[in-house]
Image: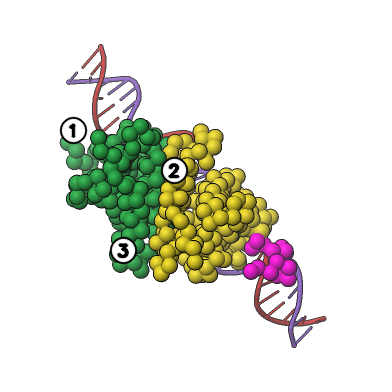
Chain colours: A green, B yellow, C red, D purple
DNA sequence: CTCCAAACTTGACGATGTAAACTTTACACA
DNA sequence: TGTGTAAAGTTTACATCGTCAAGTTTGGAG
C-alpha cells in the first residue's frame, strides 16, 4: 500500500506517527497544557477516540511523544558535536550547547520529556548505550574517565551541571528567559566548570 | 506575612490557607495530576466554586501552593544547615543535602514549584535576597566568591549542579529512584565536585 | 434595624479522558 | 475468487474538570 493516505480509505496509513507529529506541533505552538488527545486527533484528521487504538490513554501518548522528543534531542546534540571542534573538550562543550539549545528551542517538549513519570519509557534506551541521548553525553565523557575509575562519576557531574543549568534557565531562575537575548552568555560559568571537571583527558 | 488571626471569614476560618494545605496533602498523597480545584475544595469542606474567590483559577492555586512549597523548601535547607557543620564548606554540603532531601520527600511539590511558568510568582523572593530558598543557597556561596568577582558565577555553578542532580535523580536517570535505598550514595560525585567548585573560601 | 459587600453555594456549559457499541476496511485463507 | 475475522476508526455516552453567572448566607457598618 502507498504511504499517502487515501481519503476514501477508512484506515489512515500511519496514524500513530501522525498523532505523535501532531502532538509535537501542538506542544510547540501552544504549550504543554494544550497537548490533548482530542486536539491531536483533530489535527490528524481522525475522530477523538481514534488515539485509544494506538496509545494507552493520554499517558501513553505523552510517553510516545516524549520518546520521539528524546530522539530529536539526541540528534540535536549529535549535530552540535559534528559542527564544533573535534577535541574531547570541544565535544563536551558542543554537546552541552546542543543540550541547552534544544531546550530553549523546544521548551514544552523538553519539559514533557522530563515530566513523564520516572522515565520508564527510556529504560531500554538507557541500557542501549550510545543509541540514546544520554549515550551521546556518556560517550563525550569517556575520554575524561581516569583508568579504572567509575565512569558514572564524571557522567553524573556533567549531566547534573548541564541539565540543572538548562532547567533553571527555562524556569527563569537566572532572570526572565525571554528577556535574555543570548542565553550563551549566561552559560559561561557552566562552560568554565565543565573545563574544570574534564581537566585533562585520560590519554590511553 | 499572612496574619492568620483576624482574617475574619464568614463560613470558614481561613479558607485560603486551608485550600493550600489541602492541595499540598493531595499532592503528597496522589501526585501532581490529582491536584484539582474541585478536590481541594472538597477536602477543605467547601463547594467546588469556592476557591475562585481566593485564587485566580487553577493556575492561581498552583502558584500559591508552589509559593508555600518554596518556603518549606527554604526551611528544609535552613534546618539542614543548622544540623551540620558550621564551616563554609559544611554549609554548602548541608544545604545541598537539604535540597535533595526535600525533593525526595516531596517529589510532586518539588515538581510543581519548577513547573509554574517562568517562576514569576517568586520574582519578589528572588530580589528579597536571603528571604528566599535560593537566598539560602546564595548565602552559602558567598564565602567562596573571590573578591571583586561576580557572585553569580559560583552561584550558577552550585545551583545548576545540585538542581540538575536532584531533578535527574527524581526522573530516574540514575536508575529507578524507588530502587535506591540510599540516595546519598549516588550523591557522592556531586559532593566531590562541590568541593572542587568551592576550593578555598575567600577569606575576607 | 437596615442594608451592603464579601464569602460561599448552586447550577450550568464546554472541554476533556475513557469506555462501550457500532461500522468500515484490510488481509489471510479456503 | 469469495468470505470471515480482526484491526482501525466512528459514534455515543458518561464522569470529571475549570469556569462563569446568578443566587444565598453572613458579618458588620451606618
The magenta stretch is B1-17
Q: Chain of mark 1?
A: A
> Could you tell me how far apart the alpha carbons at marks 1 and 2 are, in whole angstroms?
54 Å
User: Can you tell which of label 1 and label 2 is closer to the viewer?
Assistant: 2
Q: Is residue B37 visible?
A: no
Q: Chain of mark 2?
A: B
Name the N-terminal-most of marks 3 and 1: 1
User: Can you tell which of label 3 and label 2 is closer to the viewer?
Assistant: 2
Q: Is residue A90 left or right of residue A148?
A: left
Residue A14 tag number: none
Tell me if residue B11 is in the magenta stretch. yes
Q: Circle 1 sits in a helix, a strand or a loop, which is it?
A: loop
The residue that label 1 is drawn on is: A1
Q: Circle 3 sits in a helix, a strand or a loop, which is it?
A: helix
Dot 3 and dot 2 residues touching (CB under 8 Å): no
* Nearer to us in this view, A169 or B26: A169
The residue that label 2 is drawn on is: B189
Q: Residues within 10 Å of mark 3 (few under 14, many from 20)?
A: few
Dot 1 and dot 2 residues touching (CB under 8 Å): no
Q: Residue at x 21, y 41 (%)?
A: A5
Q: Residue at x 47, y 46 (%)?
A: B191
Quarter of the image where one finds residue D29: bottom right
Q: Is residue C4 above or below residue B127?
A: below
Most extreme residue toward the front is B203
The residue that label 3 is drawn on is: A185
Dot 3 and dot 1 residues touching (CB under 8 Å): no
Q: Is residue A101 left or right of residue B114?
A: left
Image coords of residue B84 (percent x, y):
60, 50
Same chain? Circles 1 and 2? no
Image coords of residue B136 (percent x, y):
54, 60
Amino acid at each position: 500500500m502507498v504511504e499517502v493516505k487515501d481519503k476514501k480509505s477508512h484506515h489512515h496509513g500511519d496514524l500513530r506517527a501522525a498523532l505523535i507529529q501532531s502532538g509535537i506541533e501542538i506542544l510547540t505552538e501552544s504549550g504543554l497544557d494544550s497537548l490533548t488527545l482530542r486536539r491531536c486527533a483533530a489535527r490528524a484528521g481522525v475522530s477523538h477516540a481514534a488515539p485509544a487504538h494506538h496509545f494507552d490513554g493520554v499517558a501513553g501518548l505523552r510517553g510516545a511523544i516524549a520518546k520521539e522528543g528524546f530522539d530529536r534531542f539526541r540528534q540535536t546534540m549529535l549535530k552540535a558535536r559534528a559542527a564544533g571542534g573535534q577535541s574531547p573538550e570541544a565535544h563536551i562543550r558542543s554537546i552541552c550547547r546542543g543540550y541547552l539549545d534544544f531546550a530553549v528551542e523546544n521548551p514544552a517538549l523538553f519539559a514533557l520529556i522530563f515530566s513523564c513519570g520516572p522515565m520508564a519509557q527510556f529504560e531500554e534506551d538507557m541500557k542501549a548505550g550510545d543509541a540514546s541521548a544520554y549515550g551521546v553525553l556518556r560517550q563525550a565523557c569517556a575520554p575524561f574517565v581516569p583508568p579504572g575509575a567509575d565512569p558514572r562519576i564524571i557522567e553524573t557531574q556533567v549531566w547534573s551541571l548541564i541539565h540543572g543549568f538548562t532547567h533553571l534557565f527555562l524556569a527563569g531562575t537566572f532572570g526572565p528567559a525571554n528577556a535574555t537575548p543570548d542565553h550563551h552568555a549566561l552559560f559561561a560559568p557552566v562552560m568554565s566548570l565543565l573545563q574544570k571537571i574534564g581537566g585533562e583527558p585520560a590519554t590511553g
